[in-house]
Structures are given as structure tokens and as C-alpha cells.
Image (spheres, grey):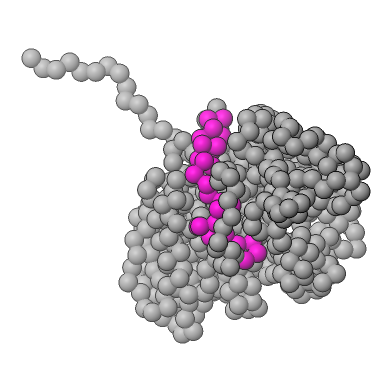
């Protein structure tokens, strides 16, 4: 007797999440486009330039913080996570931006800052007014100082921005705390509070249930407004080790640096936090959770991308790699190895608001631009999600700003020894022959632009088929529509100083980091970073072949 046939239809394959191969365009709102003439970019400026982002070919925009903030760290010190700072507009402006972006099939991802609040947050004001051991102080990390009079910090941790990670307050039986955190007034010196970054950014205590309940409220507030996900700032730093112990390895610590034995980050309890966050995201299947994860060990990095934690982990391998084919291949292998244990999606970026721009990192000037052109072809040929920092598509370099223009708290906290990150945050040049290049109606943006950017404006580059912007547009269009850019990669043999890999879909990408031309691998040229590529790949160039 034959076996009965099933009458049920096979289950259709699950849809591939939109973010798995998306190109995210990172917008630093202060520096993108200003519409109200105050010299600082705003949400209306972003909305006015959505056509440019659509023309570029990005799938999503990632907004650096636009929530209410005193701007001690340019928005990463949030005083109200469920409102828009007036510097950028209001909630109506934000809602309109989301609606118009979605109408253009552009997703909107926000920055989320859960590790700390602003010192101007109502919770911190309440903590300063409350006694030690109170519910209000339990939301943060308050501790008694060490030494006979408690004059020494509770442990030896430094701040990422320089100086100690602790600031002492004045107890409320004296003059009330006002102004800058830790500023001394008449009264009795009190406890110390932890801040891994600036004193204006007190760290939250993620062992406190009120902290998670407030984050859940924030997530739902924005997701219900149509936001398509969050990039989670300091996703590896929210949990702290029990007892906040001293550490002996600070001699290897540098400003804005992380290392895998650093007790301030990557505590195992952080994964419980991300599992709870993921349960909320699972109620919003359109949304993506992207963690900023400064963890170098591949196995520990992979832990953040387990199926019940983050969707994506922000990977910095390529952003920290110089112009060397061996190092670039090692960075790619490292990124792929970091997601392989959990079958995660790799991510790629060459720069962001915290990292030097690739043109500068690769040598500056014409050679830096040539190398940056080559590397965007390498990056866009790789499987996974790509993050493009605004201005990279124009070939912008870091700007050597005068001392009096610097605003990054790193500059002050380091005692004016580290110039900070302002050089990669200068407002974009849109049009015209002189600053502010259409960025603002004011005479100057919040950071000054160099006169030399007249040759790099978006307006000028849109009219030039050989420009960096035109290269980005061509590469993004091909990446989106050509099936050859699919599947994994296999490495090819290549001459010293070069690399080549083939996507399983059929595209070959080759890179030459040497000073001499090399023969092209087999195939027809689909796109090259240098015009006129025929049988030889010029120095500092990359090519796509079919």
C-alpha cells in the first residue's frame, strides 16, 4: 500500500531580514545640514536632503543622538531619552522625517545611549539630593571614597576621556549641588559617582530594575513612532563587575581605547541585559538592534550575536586597519570569524564619528583619496551590512582645526594633549565655492570648514562621473541589483601586496596596495576605483570583475 500524500503546503522560506545586506548611511546631525541658521545641523536639514541619500542608494540612515541633551558630549549625555532636543527640532520634525524617509524606502535607525545619562537628567538631580543608600542613588554607581577622609576615588579606573572615572559630590546638608558635576561648594564632601566617560555622563546601575524598566519605555516610545531600530552605544559596557575592583593593567590604557582585559567593559552579565532587550525587539520584527561592541576576541564578540541577543554587532576591524593588503585580509578574516560561530551577519565600516576618516588614515591628499576609493569597493564587495559615515562618499579628510575651535571633551579632559574627534566631524560641503558651502545660512558652521573643500562639494561631484560620489553611487547600485554580489567569499592567490576574493555569486574583487601595477585576475571589468583599468590594476586601486 502506498503512503498517503500530505495535503499541507510546505512552509514558505522565512523572509531575509532587510538589514542583513543593508547599506546604512550614518548621519552626524550637527554636521549634516542646517535650516534655521544657527550653524548646527537639524532634523529639517536631514529631511531636505533625503533626496540626496536616495540618490546615493543607501537603504537606511543611522542618526547620531538627537534626544534632549546639554551637549556636554554632543548628545551622548541624554537628559530626556523620549524627546527631541530643541537644537535639532521637535517630535513633529522627527515624525515627519520618518514618514518622508519611509516614503522613499529609506529606514531610520536611532542612536540609543543606555550606559549612562546626562548629569542634567532628573534621576541624577534626585540622586544628588538624596542620602547615601537611597533608592535614587541606587540607579547609579555611588560609592564612599577610600582613605581616612574618603578623599580617594573608590577604585583606580580611568575615564575613557582621560582623568579618573570618579567624581566626588557635595552632600545635600551643605550648599546644593549646582553647575558642573563634582564642582565643590561649601558643605560636607560626600560620595563619589562612576562615569566611564565625562563627569557629565554618570553611569547607570544595570543591576537596578528601574533602569531596565525606563529603557523599555524608551524603546517602545520610538519603535511605536515607526523607528526601524537602534544602534546601541557602548553595548558592551552596561554591566559592571561585582565590587568594582581595582585593575593592574592601566599602563596599556590610552584615551578612547579598549582592550579585552579591561574590567570596565564586557562583563558577562551584559548578556542578560541584551537578552531582555531582544525580547522587546521580537515584538517589533521590522526593527534591528545594532550593538557598538569594542571586543577584539572573536569568540567573545560572537556571544553578543547569539539568536536571543543583538541582530548586528558594529565591527571595527577595517576602521582600525592601515594600508596593507595582509592587514586588510586579516581584518576581513577576523570579522568573518567573529560572526561565524553563531551564523551572524558581518558588518563593515571604514570610519565613523569616533574614528579618523579613511582618506586621512590612508595617507591624506591624492594618495589617501585613491586608497579610500579602492577600499570602498573592497568593503561593498563583502557579504553583510555596510555603514558609510556621512562625508566619506565625498572623499573628505580629517580637518586640522585650530585649538580655539575644538569642542570635544577629550581635548579638555586630556589636558590639551589629545585633540579629540572634532576633525572628523566638520560640517559637510554641499555647494558653492567658499565656506560654509551651503551647510548653513550663518557665516560659519559650528566647526569651520577648509577652503579646499570647494572641490569636494556634493554639487560639484554629482556633475563629475569620475568623482568619489559617482563611484559610490555606481557601486551601491551594482551591489543592489547584481546577483553576482551574493553568497560568501573564497580567497584567491595574489601577488605580494595584493588581495583577491570571489563572491559565491560570481564577482571577483581585487586590491593592489603596492606602488606598481599588477596583472588583473581573469574576468571582465565591472567597476574600478581608477578610470581606464584594462589588463593591469594600477597602484592603490581596486576592481570588480565578472
The x, y position of residue 91, in whole percent, is 79, 35
- Specify whether residue 263 is painted magenta: yes
What residue is at 87 percent from the left and 52 percent from the top? 184
What residue is at 49 percent from the left and 44 percent from the top? 268
- Whether residue 426 is situated above or below residue 178 in the rendered picture: below
- Whether residue 8 is situated above or below residue 389 in the rendered picture: above
Residue 95 can be seen in this image: no
Q: Is residue 422 left or right of residue 258?
A: right
Q: Is residue 281 left or right of residue 492?
A: right
The x, y position of residue 5, in whole percent, is 20, 18
- 460 or 391, nearer to the observer: 391
- 340 or 2, nearer to the observer: 340
Q: Quadrant of residue 330?
A: bottom left
- Whether residue 221 is situated above or below residue 353 in the rendered picture: above
The x, y position of residue 191, in whole percent, is 75, 45
- Specify whether residue 265 is painted magenta: yes
Q: Quadrant of residue 511?
A: bottom left
Q: Find the magenta span and give its range.
A: 254-280
The x, y position of residue 256, in whole percent, is 64, 61
- Name, please, the residue furthest toward the front: 148
- Name, please, the residue furthest toward the bottom: 516
Residue 306 can be seen in this image: yes
Question: Which quadrant of the figure contains the C terminus?
Answer: bottom left
What residue is at 50 percent from the left and 61 percent from the top? 317
Tally of numbered tags: 0
- Name, please, the residue furthest toward the left: 1
Q: Is residue 95 left or right of residue 363?
A: right
Question: Which quadrant of the figure contains the N terminus?
Answer: top left
Amino acid at each position: 500500500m502506498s503512503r498517503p500524500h500530505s495535503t499541507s503546503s510546505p512552509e514558505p522560506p522565512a523572509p531575509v531580514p532587510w538589514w542583513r545586506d543593508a547599506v546604512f548611511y550614518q548621519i552626524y546631525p550637527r554636521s549634516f545640514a542646517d535650516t534655521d541658521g544657527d550653524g548646527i545641523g537639524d532634523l529639517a536639514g536631514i529631511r531636505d536632503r533625503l533626496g540626496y541619500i536616495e540618490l546615493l542608494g543607501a537603504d537606511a540612515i543611522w542618526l547620531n543622538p538627537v534626544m534632549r541633551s546639554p551637549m556636554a558630549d554632543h548628545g551622548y549625555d541624554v537628559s530626556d531619552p523620549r524627546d527631541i532636543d530643541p537644537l535639532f527640532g521637535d517630535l513633529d520634525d522627527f515624525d515627519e522625517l520618518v514618514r518622508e524617509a519611509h516614503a522613499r524606502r529609506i529606514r531610520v535607525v536611532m542612536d540609543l545611549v543606555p550606559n549612562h545619562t546626562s548629569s542634567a537628567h532628573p534621576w541624577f538631580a534626585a540622586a544628588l539630593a538624596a542620602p547615601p543608600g537611597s533608592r535614587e542613588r541606587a540607579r547609579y554607581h555611588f560609592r564612599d571614597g577610600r582613605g581616612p577622609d574618603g578623599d580617594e576615588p573608590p577604585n583606580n579606573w580611568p575615564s575613557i576621556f582621560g582623568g579618573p572615572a570618579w567624581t566626588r559630590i557635595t552632600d545635600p546638608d551643605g550648599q546644593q549641588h549646582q553647575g558642573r558635576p563634582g564642582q565643590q561648594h561649601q558643605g560636607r564632601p560626600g560620595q563619589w559617582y562612576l562615569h566611564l566617560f565625562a563627569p557629565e555622563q554618570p553611569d547607570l546601575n544595570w543591576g537596578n530594575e528601574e533602569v531596565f524598566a525606563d529603557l523599555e519605555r524608551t524603546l517602545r516610545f520610538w519603535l511605536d513612532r515607526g523607528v526601524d531600530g537602534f544602534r546601541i552605544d557602548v553595548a558592551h559596557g552596561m554591566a559592571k563587575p561585582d565590587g568594582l575592583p581595582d585593575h593592574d593593567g592601566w599602563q596599556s590604557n590610552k584615551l578612547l581605547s579598549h582592550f579585552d582585559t579591561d574590567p570596565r567593559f564586557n562583563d558577562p552579565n551584559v548578556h542578560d541585559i541584551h537578552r531582555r532587550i531582544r525580547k522587546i525587539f521580537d515584538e517589533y520584527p521590522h526593527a534591528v538592534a545594532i550593538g557598538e561592541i569594542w571586543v577584539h576576541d572573536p569568540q567573545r564578540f560572537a556571544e553578543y550575536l547569539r539568536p536571543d541577543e543583538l541582530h548586528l554587532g558594529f565591527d571595527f576591524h577595517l576602521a582600525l586597519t592601515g594600508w596593507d593588503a595582509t592587514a586588510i585580509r586579516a581584518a576581513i578574516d577576523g570579522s568573518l570569524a567573529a560572526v561565524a560561530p553563531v551564523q551572524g551577519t558581518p558588518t563593515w565600516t571604514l570610519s565613523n564619528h569616533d574614528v579618523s576618516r579613511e582618506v586621512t588614515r590612508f595617507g591624506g591628499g591624492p594618495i589617501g583619496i585613491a586608497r579610500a576609493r579602492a577600499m570602498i569597493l573592497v568593503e561593498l564587495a563583502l557579504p553583510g551590512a555596510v555603514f558609510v559615515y556621512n562625508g566619506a562618499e565625498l572623499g573628505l579628510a580629517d580637518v586640522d582645526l585650530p585649538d580655539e575651535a575644538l569642542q570635544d571633551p577629550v581635548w579638555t579632559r586630556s589636558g590639551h594633549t589629545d585633540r579629540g574627534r572634532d576633525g572628523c566631524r566638520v560640517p559637510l560641503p554641499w555647494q558653492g565655492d567658499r565656506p560654509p558651502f551651503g551647510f548653513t545660512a550663518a557665516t560659519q558652521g559650528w566647526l569651520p570648514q577648509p577652503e579646499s573643500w570647494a572641490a569636494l562639494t556634493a554639487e560639484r561631484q554629482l556633475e563629475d562621473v569620475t568623482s568619489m560620489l559617482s563611484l559610490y553611487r555606481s557601486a551601491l547600485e551594482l551591489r543592489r541589483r547584481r546577483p553576482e554580489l551574493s553568497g560568501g567569499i573564497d580567497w584567491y592567490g595574489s601577488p605580494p601586496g595584493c588581495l583577491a576574493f570571489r563572491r559565491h555569486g560570481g564577482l571577483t574583487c581585487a586590491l593592489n596596495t603596492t606602488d606598481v601595477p599588477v596583472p588583473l585576475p581573469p574576468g571582465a571589468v565591472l567597476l574600478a576605483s581608477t578610470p581606464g583599468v584594462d589588463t593591469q590594476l594600477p597602484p592603490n586601486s581596486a576592481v570588480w570583475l565578472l
